[in-house]
Image (cartoon, rainbow, N blue to C red):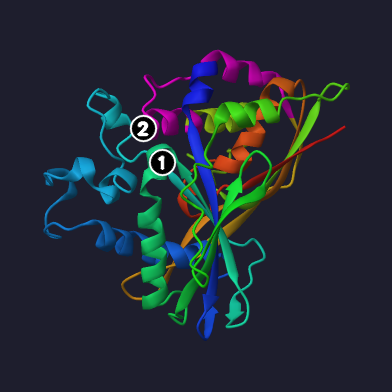
Amino acid sequence: MKDFLENFRMAKYRFLLRPREYLKLSHYAGSSLRRDFIDVFKEICCNEDKSLSCTKCPKKAECAYYQVIEGGTRKDHGDLAKRFQTPPKPFVFEPPLNRKTYYGNKEDLAFDLLLIGKGLQYFPYFVATIRKIGELGMGRNHGKFTIRKILGIDLKTNYVVSEYSFSSGSEKLDRDISVSLADLYRKNLWKEPDPLNGVEVTFLTPLRMKRVGFSNWHLYFKTLMRSVLGRMSILNYFHNDYSELVDFQEFIESARGVRISQDNLIWDDWRHPRKRDDSDHKLGGYIGDIAYAGNIEDYWPFLKIAEVLHVGKNCGFGMGRILVESVK
């Protein structure tokens, strides 16, 4: 377990965007970014024939777009290539949670970017992509913006530890601010004298999982932990080049003893604007809170790590963001 946690590295950055006139966004700001990011990222990264399939490109091993968006390659993953044709991406955008839809030219739109494993080395491509989107325009009104400042966040303390200011030209983001899962695990070990017998998990953005939305689907604690640990394992294998895909089966099975004590999850649709015709389609999921009761101490550090990594599917643009609190 120790080497698994030490191997997994990530870093968090905060972008402060200043509209040139104004921005009009969707209720979920992540959907506005999702609409444009992948196409612009490819334009920034790819210097080859755009009509050529990425899988056939002779330079795919060095291509940031292929490694980040298409899932990259691992020569030794064999049958796993069929099982995980689209591994989770090594980044998570966290847009504002306030559902604010209008930003004027005297206020910042702030969002966080988590980079994981090999995604860390491609940070300059992310910056270049956001700058290009600012030139092209984003949101319902295709509003233009500039990057006013980028802050480096220490995930262990949530303090700002580095800064890049485009106005002053000061650059301090060349320092390594990455942390490991081991750092966060140690930080979040349950140290209270009283045992932890209850936890409340709040889904701040919609949760999407396999079979979510089915009438007989419930977010049992075992289901939640399978998603949390499975996401950690897949990200570590594909994007941190860990030697194996760890299943944590015994640890997950022991989660059966934790029961749902209260369920206040409700269905919510994230309306995502299409790129081609500006019409919307829905990305539904559950928001709200759910409480669990049982022996949770061993799972607590991983639940707190999930606050950083998110849970479920479509996490790259902000889905599955959670808040975990103890219940006495």
Residue 307: tell me if it is visible: yes
Can you tell which of label 1 and label 2 is closer to the viewer?
A: 2
The structure residue drawn at horizontal position 49% and vertical position 34%, both measured from the top left corner, is: 9
Q: Kindly report the secondary structure that dominates the magenta region of the rendered protein.
A: helix
Up-down relation of residue 295 to residue 158 (above or below): above
Q: CA distance from mark 1 to mark 2?
A: 9 Å
Q: Is 63 left, or right, of 132 in this rendering?
A: left
Residue 112 located left or right of residue 240? right
Query: Which residue in the structure is indicated by mark 1?
Result: 88
Label 1 vs 2, first from the N-terminus: 1
Quadrant of the frame with the C terminus: top right
The residue sitting at 49% across, 58% down in the picture is: 171
Q: Is residue 253 magenta?
A: yes
Q: How many marks?
A: 2
User: Quick check: 255 left or right of 169?
Assistant: right
**Residue topped by disc 2:** 238
- SS at circle 2: helix
Mark 1 secondary-structure assignment: loop
Q: Position of residue 67 (x, y in %)?
A: 29, 43
Question: Image height check: is 248 above or below 41?
Answer: above
Q: Quarter-wise, where is residue 225 in the image?
A: top right
| Crowdedness near tag 1: few (<14), some (14–19) or many (≥20) residues, C-alpha within 10 Å | many
Task: Check whether the beta carbons of the residues at disc 1 and disc 2 lie within 8 A of each other.
Answer: yes
Residue 89 can be seen, yes or no: no
Query: Could you tell me the amino acid type at mark 2?
Result: Phe
- The residue that appears at 18% across and 49% down in the rendered structure is 54
